[in-house]
Image (cartoon, helix red, strand yellow):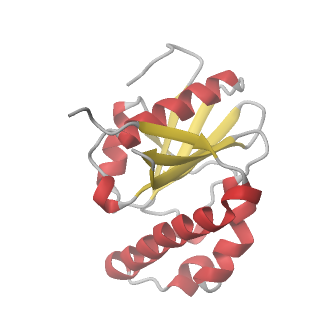
Amino acid sequence: MSPARITLRPSELARDRSALRQLNSEYMSWVMGQLQQHLALSTEQALGMPLDDYIDLHLDEICQPRGGRFYLVYLGGELVGMGGLRALTPELGDLKRIYLRPTHRGQGLGDALVRQLIGDARSLGLQRLCLDSAPFMSSAHQLYRRHGFRDSGPYPGAEVPEHMHPGWCFMTLDLSGSQEAG
């Protein structure tokens, strides 16, 4: 029996809006629950608005970024995740919404997605990639480190609100060197 095939399909808002909204809702609901549990922050304290309003306000810019890419992740034809990158400047990009449904983690999907996004960033001429990640996302931090990301400070254009920067995880990857880090 062969393993299920991983497919990374570029998203299109017109076609994929419902799936993108659902995945963003799953991801952000989980993040907000973890923020409440670990940092005692409510959604409104963290985002300044209700979660559905935040998703609706940011869905287009996150999932169809100008100067970037966004993918839906399929495993054997089943939609299991998403992730993308956006260009913040001609040299700097950031990774956004790297999310896999919990039942599909640990199967190499995150590695495949991050490798694709690093390759896309290089093809777009970006010199550096950044990301922000919650302090409780230790598995994600390990994934990013495997691909060469290193801890750094906050960067201009980070999505996480400034009042949450202390204690947040910010990482960067220099793309000007070797072609494959992980």
Which quarter of the rendering shows the C terminus? Answer: top left
In the foreground, 31 or 170? 31
In x, y percent, where is residue 181? 42, 22
The relative height of residue 148 versus residue 31 in the rendered view (above or below) is above
Relative image position of residue 49 (x, y in whole percent): 65, 84
Q: Which residue appears farthest toward the front when viewing the image? A: 1
At horizontal 27% and vertical 35% (from top left) the residue drawn is 3
Give the left or right position of residue 36, taking residue 58 as reference. left
What quarter of the picture does the N terminus occupy?
A: top left
Q: Where is residue 115 shown, x and y percent of the image?
A: 47, 30
Vertical placement of 68 versus 55: above or below?
Answer: above
Q: Residue at x 41, y 72 (%)?
A: 30
Confirm whether residue 54 shows in the render.
Answer: yes
Residue shown at the point (65%, 25%) measured from the top left: 127
- Regarding residue 150, the answer to whether it shows in the image is no
Residue 74 vs residue 30, the one in the foreground: 74
Residue drawn at x 42%, y 34% as measured from the top left: 112
Furthest-top residue in this view? 178
On the image, which quarter does residue 51 sit in? bottom right
Q: Is residue 113 above or below residue 36?
A: above
Q: Depth check: 40 or 58 in front?
A: 58
In-front residue for pair 20/142: 20
Label count reads 0
Residue 24 % position (x, y)? 55, 66
**Relative to 75, residue 14 above or below:** below
Q: Residue furthest left?
A: 1
